[in-house]
Image (cartoon, grey):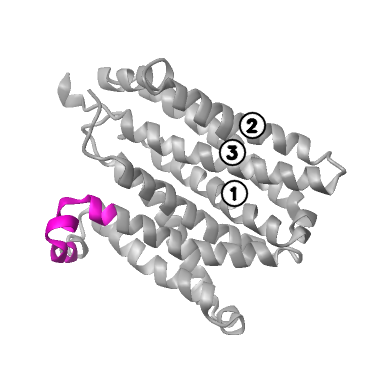
Amino acid sequence: MAQTVWGLPVILYLFLGGMGAGAYLTARWAERYPDSSAVVRVGRWLSGPLVAVGTVLLVFDLGAGKTHPWRILWLYTDLHSVMTWGTWLLTMFVPVALVHAFAPAQWTERQRWLHVVGVTLAIGVALYTGVLLAVLKAIPLWNNGLLPVLFVISAVSTGVAATVLPAVLIDPRVLRTAEGFRSIHLAVVVSELLVLTLFLFFTAEGSAAGRLSYDMLTTGSLAAAFWIGIVLVGLVLPLLLMALGAGFRSFTLQRNAVVIEALAVLVGGFFLRYVIVHAGIPQVLF
């Protein structure tokens, strides 16, 4: 019996929170490319709102968020709680991201400390999406040291996809530097595939509950979402498009390859969180 406490709101938080953090990091990286101003703008515009919406979904999925919203303030007080750490990270990241999005560019460029703080918080937010699950020892699938690593890699991948997708439609010049993004994104997607393989291996070789979660993902009720949504669409298709897209001479083919590649990554990123949340089986049942 899989866990039924956390559902779609938490899944969407894990997806949007990671994507928003990844979009911020993508925007910072894109600043080194002269033809990627659209990527910088889109990444800055997306990062704060995505994390903010995800945070609202997470808070109001908690019982206190629905019935006693003032109790949310207690989330800031227990410094020994991972949830408190995450609450502070999310609370600090959103305004920093919004400042980068809407403050005058001339001012933000002079505030070097703000860039360091923003990148640090973005990495923390991406990491927290995995740590939030990994600290729950009762569910072996989640209580895996590779889960935060997997979610950080996926956050970067979905952040790149969510940022480059609208940017390449807004400003075709982005395709001139797409090769730089493609090589980075290729390494990220390959890393995600390797970490996911190791994550599943250690899950299957662990407890009985972990083995059942593994079976649910690979041959059970979540197998279609896993093999089609994550492996085929989210990993294999982007890798093929990254390998083939560089050889397209037609501008239209190049743009379409980038668009499909980004959409596929986003679909895979959502299903990754969906199946991991739903496949969590408590060890207490054994």
Kind of residue at badge 3: Ala
> Disc 3 to disc 1, how far (Cα)?
9 Å
Quick check: marks 3 and 2 in contact, CB under 8 Å?
Answer: yes
From the image, tell me which residue sits under label 2: 237
Residue situated in front as seen by the camera: 39 or 125: 39
Question: Relative to 114, does residue 141 appear above or below in the rendering?
Answer: above
Residue at the right extreme, as displayed: 249
Q: Earlier in the sequence, mark 1 or mark 2?
A: 1
Q: Is residue 22 left or right of residue 17?
A: right
Q: Earlier in the sequence, mark 3 or mark 1?
A: 1
Residue situated in front as seen by the camera: 138 or 234: 234
Residue 87's disc is none
Residue 161's disc is 1
Q: Is residue 26 left or right of residue 213?
A: right
Residue situated in front as seen by the camera: 120 or 285: 285
Kind of residue at badge 2: Leu
- Residue at the spot 80% in from the left edge and 47% down from the top edge: 252
